[in-house]
Each structure stands twice: as C-alpha cells, then as structure tokens.
Image (spheres, rainbow, N blue to C red):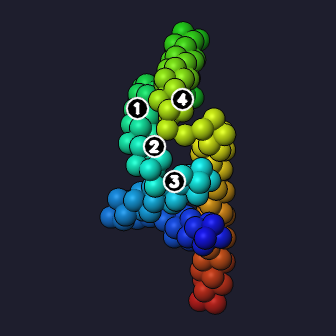
C-alpha cells in the first residue's frame, strides 16, 4: 500500500507544478492532496487518529501561513536593493519576530497534536513536512531547468531560421 501512496504522491507533485493562472486552484488542490497523502502515510495514521489530527493540523498550518504571509507583506514594502541601515534592522527584527511567532505556534500545537499522535509520529510529521518541501523545491528547480533548455532550443531554432533567410 505504501509504494502505491508514494507513487500517487510523486505523480501529483509532478503534474501540479507551475500551473497557469487559470489552473492555480486546481494545482494547489493537487499539492494539498499530495501533502495530505504523504503525511498520512508517513505518520501511519489510523482512521480515528486522522479524524482528530487533520482539523488540528490544518488550523496550525493556516495560522503558520498567516504569520509567514504577514512577514512576506512586510518584506515587500522594502526595496531590497536600496535598504538603509535602519530599514535593514527593522526587517531583520521582523524576520526574527516571525521566526519566534512560528516557534511559539509550533510549541502550542505540538501539545495539541501530541494528544492525538505519539511523539514518534510527531517526529515523523516534521520529517514529512521537510521532505515534502524539498520534493517541491526540487521539482520546481527541475521545471525551471527544463524551461531554460526549451527556451535555449527555441532561440537556436530561431537563429537557424534567421540565418537561412539571409
């Protein structure tokens, strides 16, 4: 069963990267499904555990995203190429405050989640989250390389056509 789930996860990840704007919602849904499948498999959640785990975990993930989005919004207010020393200090403090807020949130939810899953499963959760993030980054980098190669091939073809017309 686990090889099937891992194959499903890999397939979902490979098919959902860098979707066009009209497909973003569908791509996000596929990513979310892949994340859920990976975490469920890695934690080996029983149906009873899953029923209790996912509402708590989803609330945690939503709050963590909110905190990270606040920092992202703060960062976007600055011209990173022309930061003054004072702006750099404020941005650095905002980054550390964000990290502390996420850490506090993790502590709070670790207690709540540990009521549902074991400490061993909690460690597997952290590893699954890290692995999922790494898989996504690797896939995005692979897509970027493929796109660059396709662009280069297109430029070479255009150059040959241009040379043929001269």
Residue depth check, mark 3 versus mark 4: number of the one nearer the observer: 3
Where 80 sits versus 152, above or below?
above
Marks 4 and 1, how far apart at CA = 14 Å
Which residue is denoted by mark 3 in the rendering? 46
Where 105 sits versus 53, above or below?
above
Which residue is denoted by mark 4 in the rendering? 110
Marks 3 and 2, how far apart at CA = 10 Å
Q: State the residue lying farthest toward the bottom.
A: 164
Where 147 sits versus 133, above or below?
below
Which residue is denoted by mark 1 in the rendering? 63
Comes first in the chain, label 3 or label 4: 3
Residue 122 at what x, y percent from top left?
Answer: 61, 38
Task: Residue 166: name its quadrant.
Answer: bottom right
Residue 61 at what x, y percent from top left?
Answer: 45, 38
Residues packed near mark 4 inside 10 Å, few (<14), some (14 to 19) or many (20 plus): some
Residue depth check, mark 4 versus mark 1: number of the one nearer the observer: 4
Residues packed near mark 1 inside 10 Å, few (<14), some (14 to 19) or many (20 plus): some
Which residue is denoted by mark 2 in the rendering? 53
Task: Residue 127: name its quadrant.
Answer: top right
Q: Secondary structure at mark 2?
A: helix
Closer to the camera, 154 or 89? 89
Comes first in the chain, label 3 or label 1: 3
Q: Residue at x 49, y 65 (%)?
A: 16
Q: Secondary structure at mark 3?
A: loop
Marks 3 and 1, how far apart at CA = 25 Å
Q: Are marks 4 and 2 in contact (CB under 8 Å)?
A: no
């Amino acid at each position: 069963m686990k090889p099937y789930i891992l194959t499903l996860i890999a397939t979902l990840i490979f098919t959902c990267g860098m979707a066009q704007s009209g497909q973003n919602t569908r791509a996000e849904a596929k990513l979310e499904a892949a994340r859920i499948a990976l975490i469920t498999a890695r934690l080996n959640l029983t149906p009873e555990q899953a029923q209790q785990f996912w509402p708590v975990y989803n609330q945690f993930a939503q709050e963590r995203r909110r905190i990270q989005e606040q920092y992202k919004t703060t960062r976007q207010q600055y011209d990173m190429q022309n930061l003054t020393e004072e702006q750099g200090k404020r941005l650095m403090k905002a980054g550390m405050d964000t990290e502390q807020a996420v850490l506090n949130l993790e502590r709070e939810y670790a207690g709540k989640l540990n009521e549902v899953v074991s400490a061993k499963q909690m460690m597997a959760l952290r590893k699954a989250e890290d692995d999922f993030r790494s898989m996504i980054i690797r896939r995005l980098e692979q897509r970027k390389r493929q796109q660059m190669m396709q662009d280069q091939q297109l430029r070479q073809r255009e150059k040959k056509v241009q040379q043929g017309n001269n």
